[in-house]
Amino acid sequence: MENKLQVRNLRISFRTSNGKVQAVRGIDFDLREGETLAIVGESGSGKSVTSKAILGISAGNAIVESGEIIYDGQDLLKISEEDFHRIRGDKIAMIFQDPMSSLDPIVTIGHQLTEAMILKGKARQKESRRLFNTYLKNLKNAMTASGVDATVAAESCKNFDKFEFKHIELESAYNTAHEAANEAIEDIDELVFGLEHGSDKDASYHIKDIVKETKSSVNEYVLKDDAAKARELAGSLSGLYKKDRHSRDFAELISALKSLGEILKSSVGKPVPNFFRMGYYLTFSGQPLPDMPIEKLNDFLKEYLDNNFMKAFIANAKQALRYSANESRSKMAAAIDAMKAEKGVFASENLVKKDCYDAQKRLSDAVRATIDNLAITKDSLTFTFSSSLKSELDTYFGAIKKNKKAEAVHARDQRRYDRQVKRGKKPTWEVADAAVTDLLMIKGNIAHLIDRLTEHYRENITADEKRDYDSETIRVIDYLKENASGVVAKVTRRVAKDRAIRLMEEVGIAEPHKRYNQYPFEFSGGMRQRIVIAIALAANPDILICDEPTTALDVTIQSQILELINKLKVERNLSVIFITHDLGVVANMADNVAVMYAGKIVEYGTSEDIFYRAAHPYTWALLSSMPDLDTNEKLESIPGTPPNMIYPPKGDAFAPRNKYAMAIDFERQPPMFKISETHSAATWLLHPDAPKVEPPKILRDRIERMSRGRKTDNAEQQ
Amino acid sequence: MQNNSDEVLLRVEHLCQYFKIGPNAVTKAVDDVSFDIKRGEVFGLVGESGCGKTTTGRSIIKLYNITSGSVYFKGIRIAAGVKSYKDAISKARADLKAGTIDSAECSRIIAENKAAIKAANNDQKNCDREYSRKCVESVKAEYAPKLASAAGEELSKLKKEYSNELRKARNTRLVTQIQMIFQDPIASLDPRMTVREIIAEGLVIQGERDKKVIDEKVYEMLELVGLVREHASRYPHEFSGGQRQRIGVARSIIMNPELIIADEPVSALDVSVQAQVINLLNELRDRFGLTLLFIAHDLSVVKYFSDRIGVMYYGKMVELADSDELFLNPLHPYTKSLLSAIPLPDPNYEKARRRITYNPLAAHDYSVNGPSFREIKPGHFVMCNDAEFEQYKKELK
């Protein structure tokens, strides 16, 4: 399984009037494809902050201090808001805790489900048009620069634009008709099955749909010759049903449905012409299509297109691609040199403002020059370099300025600290710096940024020599086709409604046609959460973030929703990040578990590791503070409260609440000790010199019980 | 856990709570529920959301006027509904028209039920007044000899004390001995009152005016629930969720209640804090011999905490038994489905767990023989009809 999402050394703080709250303090994890990762912890441990950072919806006062969240080759912390529009909701979706407050109470469910689809559809149309036009323009320029005659280049690009849209028009008309016919067949099958088994539930809905779908399957290459007959049959259905409903003998209706089904099936199975070639022929030949069978027609059109246009266009495009790539490669070499030269400016003891910004401008120009306009996948490192460098510098010089208020707070804290030391006490907290930012860390970030890009360019230069320009040219043409189809593909209210109803069926809502027009208050809690899940799934995301999706629900509904999420996960191969504080739920859902405390991951492992072989005292405490069905003794609650993250503790954050804490826990933060390949925990107890400690009795008893239960289960199975 | 005595503290008989939701429609939130709670025990009430658990709790504490049935607290009827009597009267009139009973019989039934309605209305309205009259009498009886024997400065002091006690006794309500802990600690505390005001509010309403006494009591309660004196002058938003719920507990126990209705007190809390609150309630229970009606939907917590458990489904009580017995021998199909939905912190068990779904139409055939609430084994009640009764008997281990 490949990694879908990688989080590296993520640090997030919040600026508040009392000081800087360090909510997340350097966490790392991977999310693999088709896997569920559960993040467990008390409220305030930074679970939700992490998930919001992944989705790019952090609160306004959040500062990302360092780290990377890599999705699909891009760092989500650095990409622009426009790029995020394409990821948020489409690729990564979220299910919120409280279904009532995440749905609009005065808008119908149907509207809420389709709203995003329609808006996204409109935005995608505009975006596709823009991408298509700019790419074609860049291609034309590159062709001219690479030595193709300017008029030829302009002409061929213009022609491509023209006939490509004809192609898409033909094809989308065909697709709509074909899809409608298929849906009609499905509906007919379902209805016939129901009627044969004596149930006419939803029959009138189905008949209405079938009539509509038959109407829209009329097309040159789908339902042509039999169109009149099919429409007549479809029109008669409703009358037949009304007639038969009272006698409950549906023989006539069934036979009509079956013959309509036959007609549709035969029309769906017809061979498909190649619309791309047909578009060219129809646009430029000025003649009607020759009358011949479709296989022959395809061959004829291919020859016509290749001879008149395609061969020359491909050759020119390939030349342009090669030229543009070479150009970019030489710029990359220049950029590497520039970075080597300027790196010293950012490494000195005290950065000089003017020098830094000048160097930043020069570097940005050098890096921007390396952008290859014809590359289809954008290189996120190159694109985000100048803005992230500038923002780092801004933070640095902003932090150097003395802030009177912060200084005063710092001085007060320092005095308090000194007073405590004087009295002979040992404070368990550290005095936070007056500046909210760590200057050294920013310098490190800058160095990292430059090194990473240099490395990346070196790799690119070596990889470039082995590039296959033939397949890349084909990809370019596919890319243009895809964008052109994006311009034509319209998400109408009707299409959106059909999709919404299919989604509602998928998440297990009965009578979706009726429910579509209802308001959220007419749904029960579990049903509302299903709607929220349907909305999250509307754009077919790869990653689903569930932020306590069942905390507000009761047990039976909770287990239904969990089953639903598990089912959808398998069907759609989703990766799920599941945030919760209920460990029973975690045992049900998770492949891997990360236990968080005070902004750090304190234990990480598979769910078996965590539940049967837990190693961190905090995990022990969590596990033993919840009763199960056989618990009789007093529960082990965790004393005290989580630390105030304005004054993060010097040592292990859990030490003051930990009865196994040792002296070193108050002095130094424990590193992650690896226990097995999959299992690691951050506690000094795992250090070879530490005394051996047993988990609390209540937990040992439970694990004992569980393993005994397993054995008897196995015995029964045998 | 242990039962201290067999004295019945609270008895609920045929409790019905209907809500009007339209001109001719009612929601039967609670429909014919009966149970009793013995002194010193914890009675758990479980069921899915919307099944009437909370409504039952609120009806007992007289937050609603109940539709029908009666609630007895310490043997005194504190709430009574009249719908059943009214129905009986109209049924008698209809029968008279139909000719199945004669007019003498009819007028007898009507008179009987009218008397019952009068009694019910009287109890519903005046139970508190009568209780406070009794308290006043006992105070008078206690102080009369003392006042007679005292003299001089002591007398004036005693007189002051006497008038204070007398005022408190006059303001006493029987229902104040039942207190409630609410689900959401944020919503149930007034954000503009200090903790001291919140906790002392009940005392003040009861007539306590001595600031020193109030402060002493508030501090005592705060320390009892694991907070410190300094917290008294803070506001609710300055506390964490678990601490807020502790304030809610302190507010309810300052009235020296005999019965506490805990309405999902831990549902809104983190796991670790849940354990703190459960341990606190357990401690208080051992110390004061409190009786609790514990409403929750987390079955592991209910099992851990309760002596007896009642399972509710759509306004009806479907099964009632000792907690161990219920988990060992669940009989009603709804109980089985509820138990099969509990998630446990055991991955292997979870992977094997299969949820049983409950469909009342498929599970029961009540077309011929309607169900009633029957005792199938001492202390184990289940809602069933004759055929199911036999079948359940066989299932019993």
Image (cartoon, coloured by chain):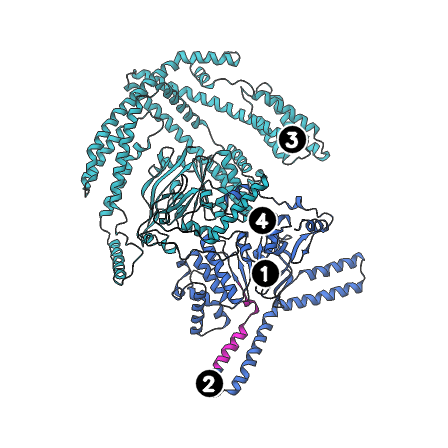
Considering the numbered disc 2 on the image, is that residue within a helix, a strand or a loop? helix
Q: Give the residue pinned by disc 1.
A: B59
CA gap, disc 1 and disc 4:
27 Å
Direction from residue A346 to residue B53 in the image, left or right:
right
Q: Main secondary structure of the magenta part?
A: helix
State the hue of chain B.
blue
Query: Which kind of residue does numbered mark 3 sit on?
Result: Phe
Please report the residue visible at 50 percent of the width from the left and 50 percent of the height from the top: A702
The cyan-coloured chain is labelled A
Direction from residue A688 to residue B115 in the image, left or right:
right
Are labels 4 and 2 on one chain?
A: yes
CA gap, disc 1 and disc 3:
50 Å
| Pointer 4 chain | B
Residue A565, x across and y down, in percent: 51, 40
Considering the numbered disc 1 on the image, is that residue within a helix, a strand or a loop? helix
Report the mark closest to the observer, 4 or 3.
4
Give the magenta-colored segment's residue range. Answer: B159-179
Q: Give the residue pinned by disc 2.
A: B154
CA gap, disc 4 and disc 3:
36 Å
In which quadrant is the C terminus of chain A drawn? top right
Please report the residue visible at 25 percent of the width from the left and 24 percent of the height from the top: A330
Sequence order check, earlier mark of 4 and 2: 2
Report the mark closest to the observer, 1 or 4.
4
Relative to A156, residue A511 above or below: below
Are labels 4 and 3 on one chain?
A: no
Q: Answer whether labels 4 and 2 touch (C-beta < 8 Å).
A: no
Dot 4, crowdedness within 10 Å: few (<14), some or many (≥20)? some
Q: Give the residue pinned by disc 4.
A: B339
Q: Residue A127's image quarter? A: top left
